[in-house]
Image: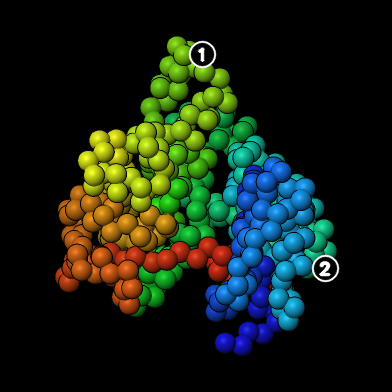
Amino acid sequence: MAITMNNWILVLNAGSSSLKFALVDAITGDSGFEGLAERLGNTDAVITIKSNGNKSESKIADGKMASAIAMVMSALPADTVPAAIGHRVVHGGEKFRQSVVIDDSVKAGIKDCAKLAPLHNLANLEGIEAAQQAFPNLPQVAVFDTAFHSQLEPQVYQYAIPQSLYRDHHIRRYGMHGTSHQYVGEQAAIALGQDFNNIQIITAHLGNGCSASAIRNGHSVDTTMGMTPLEGLVMGTRSGDVDPGIILWLAQQQGMDGDQLSDLLNKKSGLLGLSELTNDCRGIEEAAAEGHAGAKLALDVFCFRLARTISALTVGLDRLDALIFTGGIGENSELIRARVTEQLSIFKLAINETANADRKRSNPNIAQPGTTPVLVINTNEEYMIAKQTLSLCQ
C-alpha cells in the first residue's frame, strides 16, 4: 500500500532503560519499521531494528538514549521522511488534558509532572530532548497516558485524605494506559456497529502492567490506576491495591524505607510475589497446570481481583454493552478470559469456548450468542499516538 510522505509519524516510547520505536502511517496504522533499544545506561546496551521484514541487532557503544535515537535516525528507510515525532509521556497531571505540540513550556510542564511519576516522566523527557537534537526541524508531540481519563469526576478521582494534599500537591487519581483504552474502545464500537460516543463498555488492558476502565459515551468515567501505575489490579510485579496499613507496618515494624517499599511493591509483588516463580503469565499458567501451588494461587488472585474490579466499574455505567480484553495477557490468555467471565455471569457474560480458543479469530466477539459481547482486540498504542500527532501537525 502506497503511503504519502506526510502520513509517516515516528513514535518514540522512552523508558528509564529502554526505547521502543516505530514508524507508523497515521492514516492506515501500517508500520514496516520498528524496534527496541534495551539496557540503556549500561555497557551491554543493544538496539534491535526490524525493517521491511529484516531484523538486525547492534551494540550501543556508550549506552546513551541520544545514541540510540541517532541510530534509529540513521536506520530509517531512505525513501521515508517522518512528518513529525510522537512521544508517549506517562503522566500529564492536571496540566495536560490532551496531546500537545512540544515547546519549552511543555517540557517544563512534563518535568514538573515528574513529581507524580519520577520513574517515567524524566525518562520520557530525556527521549524528547534527544529526539529534538536528532530531528531539530521536525515538530514533536507529547501524547499523555493520563489524557483519556482527564474528565473523571471529583467523586472518582479524589482520595479520602486531607484536601490540602490535593490543593498543594495535586495528589489525586489520574489513571494510565489511556491511549490503549481509547483505541480498543473505538475499535470495539466499530466491531459492534455502534457509535463510540453512544456506547458503554469496560476495557481491560492486561499485560505486565494492568488496568481497566469504564468508558461511557466516548469518555473514561472510571479507571483502576491512580496517581501512579501502582494502584488497582494485580500486575506482573506490581501489587495493585493493598491495605495502606501494611505499608505503615513494614516501615514501622520492619524498618523499611521508601526505596525498599517501592522495590517491594513495584518489582517483587504481583504475579511474581504470589507465585514465587515468575511474572510471566504464560509460565504461571503452565506451572499451575502441572500443580504448582504458588502459580495456582497467583491465577486465582489475579482473576478474582480482576472480576471484582470489573463489577465495581459498572457503577459508572447505565448498562454494559461489551467487555473488551486487550494487552499481552488479555489478547493471548484464553484461560484468564474464561475464568474472569465465569465470575461475572451476573452481567450475562458467557464465553464461547471454541471462539475463545481460536487465535486466528476473524470476529473479535468470543461471547456465546444472546449474551453480552466479549471482545478480544489487539491494542495499538503506537497507531493512536501517530494519529494524535498527525492531527496536531497538519
Left or right: residue 40 compared with residue 233 = right
Q: Is residue 258 visible?
A: yes
- What is the distance, in whole Å, between disc 1 and disc 2 at their CAs? 52 Å
Where residue 282 appears, x then y in whole percent?
35, 51
Q: Is residue 311 visible?
A: no
User: Amino acid under label 2?
Assistant: Asn
Residue drawn at point x = 40 percent, y = 21 percent: 245
In the rendered view of the protein, which quadrant contains the N terminus? bottom right
Residue drawn at point x = 47 percent, y = 50 percent: 152
Is label 1 in contact with label 2 (beta carbons under 8 Å)? no
Marks 1 and 2, the one that precedes in the sequence:
2
Pointer 2: what residue? 137
Left or right: residue 390 compared with residue 286 = right
User: Amino acid under label 1?
Assistant: Gly
Residue drawn at point x = 22 percent, y = 67 percent: 367
Mark 1 or mark 2, whichever is nearer to me: 1
Classify mark 2: helix, strand or loop.
loop
Label number found at residue 255? 1
Determine the image quadrant of residue 292.
top left
Q: Nearer the viewer, residue 30 or 139?
A: 30
Where residue 30 appears, x then y in whole percent?
56, 76
Q: Is residue 300 above or below residue 380?
A: above
Q: Is residue 268 above or below residue 55?
A: above
